[in-house]
Amino acid sequence: MPPDDPRYERYPPGFFARMDGAADGAFYRHPRLVAHIDDRAIGAVGRLYRRLGLSGRVLDLMSSWISHFDEPPEALVVAGRNGAELAANPQARGGVVVDLNDHPGLPFADASFDAATCCVSVDYLTSPLEVFDEVARVLRPGGLFCVTFSNRCFPTKVIQGWAQTDDRTHVAIVASYFAGSGPWDQPDHGYDGPPDRRGDPLHGVWARRASM
Ligand SMILES: C[S@@+](CC[C@H](N)C(=O)[O-])C[C@H]1O[C@@H](n2cnc3c(N)ncnc32)[C@H](O)[C@@H]1O
């Protein structure tokens, strides 16, 4: 649950509760070397990263064995809950195991990344404003943080505020995380879904670390 922080007052009671409120260690103990979205949606993530020009030293947050870049950036660092998943990531230059719900801090220096990503995972964060603060801290001014999501999840681990709302509200929820943390420039968003609606939709919300 989020700490006693007035920034969370805009969210209703129970918003960050989860069906499985236990620490995340047990749930993520065994690696899941699977794709969490279909091939078309994976392609949509790569297209978005290319369109946004993500390059240089990039942090993939809540990462696993797959980071979805068409062309890997010069130096990709992955951070996630399962070390075996991170070690199997062929695009990564390095990885760190973190539990962002236990400790939202990131073990990186200020302004040490050019961009950051978080794919199909933001819905598991129980202290998102602290995590977004930390991403802003480790990004250089002008660096982009791109958050993508679809409509699938681990139902016991997703926050209730996400589980009980639709895709359009999910875009607003991520935009509210940017608005409540930072400093960030105004966020933007995009949608890349299957033309026949069969398959996984892909939404993105992104913002640049403000220059101050
Ligand atoms: C649905 S998977 C997505 C993995 C990857 N980003 C992708 O696009 O396939 C969710 C990921 O979030 C990570 N995760 C879940 N809870 C976490 C936590 N408390 N701290 C850090 N990472 C976490 C897990 O390690 C897992 O790999």
Image (spheres, rainbow, N blue to C red):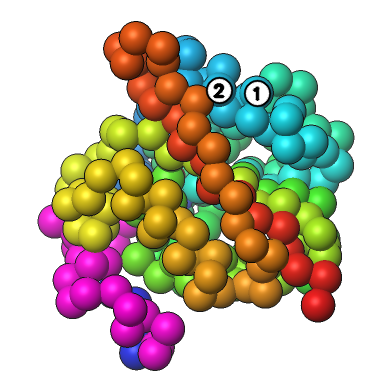
Taking depth in this image into account, of 28 and 125 the one nearest to the observer is 125
For the residue with label 1, is its CB less than 8 Å from the closest atom of ligand 1? no
Q: Is residue 116 left or right of residue 158?
A: right
- Please identify the quadrant where the N terminus is shown: bottom left
User: Separation of disc 1 and disc 2 at Cα?
Assistant: 5 Å
Q: Quadrant of residue 134?
A: bottom right
In the image, residue 149 lies in the stretch drawn in magenta? no
Report the span colored magenta: 5-24
Q: Quadrant of residue 35?
A: top left
Query: Which label belongs to residue 24?
Result: none
**Residue neighbourhood size for the residue with mark 1, other residues' Cα within 10 Å, grouped as few (<14), some (14–19), many (≥20):** some
Q: Residue at 33% across / 78% down in the picture?
A: 10
Question: Label 1 is placed on what type of residue?
Answer: Arg
Question: Label 2 is placed on what type of residue?
Answer: Ala
Residue placed furthest toward the left: 19
- Please identify the quadrant where the C terminus is shown: bottom right
Query: Which label belongs to residue 44?
Result: 2
What element does badge 2 sit on?
A: helix
Q: Tell me where residue 142 appears, x and y as whole percent.
A: 81, 59
For the residue with label 2, is its CB less than 8 Å from the closest atom of ligand 1? no
Q: Tell me where residue 194 appears, x and y as whole percent.
A: 41, 15
In the image, residue 8 lies in the stretch drawn in magenta? yes
Q: Residue at 29% across / 33% down in the picture?
A: 152
**Residue neighbourhood size for the residue with mark 2, other residues' Cα within 10 Å, grouped as few (<14), some (14–19), many (≥20):** many
Q: Residue at 29% across / 62% down in the picture?
A: 23
- Does residue 114 sit above or below 100 in this rendering? above
Query: Which label belongs to residue 47?
Result: 1
Q: Residue at 39% across / 90% down in the picture?
A: 6
